[in-house]
Amino acid sequence: MILKYKSESISGDLRYYINKKKMLFLNGYHDISLLNIHIQTMLYFSLNNMNKKLNIFVNNFNTNNECLPFFLNNLHYIEKFYNTTGYGLITTHSLVILSGGMKNKRKVFPNTKIYLNYNNPLFLDKYKMFPMKSFENNYYFLFVNRIIRVNSKISNIRKRRSFTNTIDIYERNYFIPNLKAIEFGIIDSIFL
């Protein structure tokens, strides 16, 4: 059964990012039930997105040994609606997220880069093989709400870390506020 939500803003936000962005980043899976809610949410908003290319990442805050097989077993539901090019399950919470600012005042400079490391991801391609070319090695990216709030944090990170790779900064947004512990983030072209 597909869950249905009443908020018009939910539909508008999520449809925009599914239609316009190349990746959907799903965050906040403390357990299997939250993962299932996210999958159902995607399906509910996917009616007009047949054959849409979409890279899907799943971040599991509290690593649950049952989460990965559950995710893999449900990929075929997503494939009915999307021409998915790859999937990723991040089994450790090592993706750095900087946030702040009001929803209607978010600003992101697409050419902004910082250096950061993000460890131990597990990636699978659409055939559930490991790894897919687009997903080999570790990837480095950052989601932000407002670049103004982030500049000083970037400087502090650079002072504390030694860097081996660059990452792009992309917009990050909270969706579906009436569902607890659910966050969505998007990036444009890291795999293109």
Image: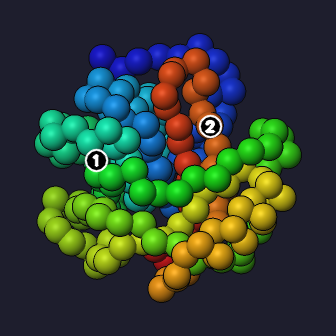
Q: Amino acid at mark 2?
A: Tyr
Q: Amino acid at mark 1?
A: Glu
x and y, in percent, of residue 150 in the image: 75, 59
Query: Is residue 142 depicted above or below 138 in this figure?
Result: above
x and y, in percent, of residue 78 in the image: 31, 42
- The residue at 35%/27% (across/down) is 34
Residue 21 visible? The answer is no
Q: Quadrant of the N terminus?
A: top left
Q: Which residue ends up furthest to the front in the rendered image?
A: 160
- Dot 1 or dot 2: first in sequence order is 1
Q: Which residue ends up furthest to the bottom in the rendered image?
A: 164
Q: Which residue ends up furthest to the top in the rendered image?
A: 6
Disc 1 versus disc 2: nearer the observer: 2
Which of 66/115 is in front? 115
Which of 161/105 is in front? 161
- The residue at 69%/68% (across/down) is 156
Q: Label 2 neighbourhood size at 10 Å, few (<14), some (14-19), many (20+)?
A: some
Q: Secondary structure at mark 1?
A: helix
- Residue receiving disc 2: 174
- Residue receiving disc 1: 79
- The residue at 48%/85% (across/down) is 164
